[in-house]
Image (cartoon, grey):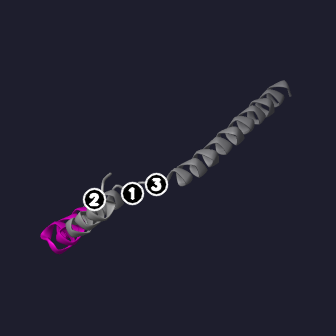
């Protein structure tokens, strides 16, 4: 059977070494760089996208109704 306390000890030592090395700073810098790039791209969340898609769907429905109403009014004017 494997002694889990030895594995945990080894894991903790590796974490300490990684935290105290320049690798931790590089990781933070890369994270900040990626976050900044994504912010500049003006990405939206899925929820925001879904809300805007619903607004657009509703606007299209209203436009279709208004176009039909306009056609009916134009037809009515032609008959007069």
Select label 3 or label 2 by which is in front: 2
Q: CA distance from mark 2 to mark 1?
A: 13 Å
Which residue, as the protein is rendered here, is positioned at the far top? 79
| Residue at the disc numbered 3 | 44
Q: Position of residue 3 (x, y in %)?
A: 30, 59
Q: Magenta span: helix, strand or loop, mainly?
A: helix
Residue at (56%, 53%) from the top-left corner?
A: 47
Disc ID at residue 54: none
Q: CA distance from mark 1 to mark 3?
A: 7 Å
Give the magenta part as a residue range.
15-30
| Residue at the disc numbered 1 | 42
Q: Residues within 10 Å of mark 3 (few under 14, many from 20)?
A: few
| Residue at the disc numbered 2 | 34
Q: Position of residue 77 (x, y in %)?
A: 81, 31
Q: Residues within 10 Å of mark 1 (few under 14, many from 20)?
A: few
Answer left or right for 77 relative to 60.
right
């Amino acid at each position: 059977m494997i002694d889990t306390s030895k594995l945990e000890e080894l894991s903790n030592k590796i974490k300490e070494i990684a935290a105290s090395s320049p690798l931790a700073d590089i990781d933070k810098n890369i994270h900040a760089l990626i976050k900044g790039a994504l912010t500049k791209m003006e990405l939206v969340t899925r929820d925001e996208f879904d809300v805007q898609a619903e607004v657009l769907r509703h606007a299209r429905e209203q436009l279709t109704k208004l176009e039909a109403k306009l056609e009916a009014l134009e037809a009515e004017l032609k008959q007069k």
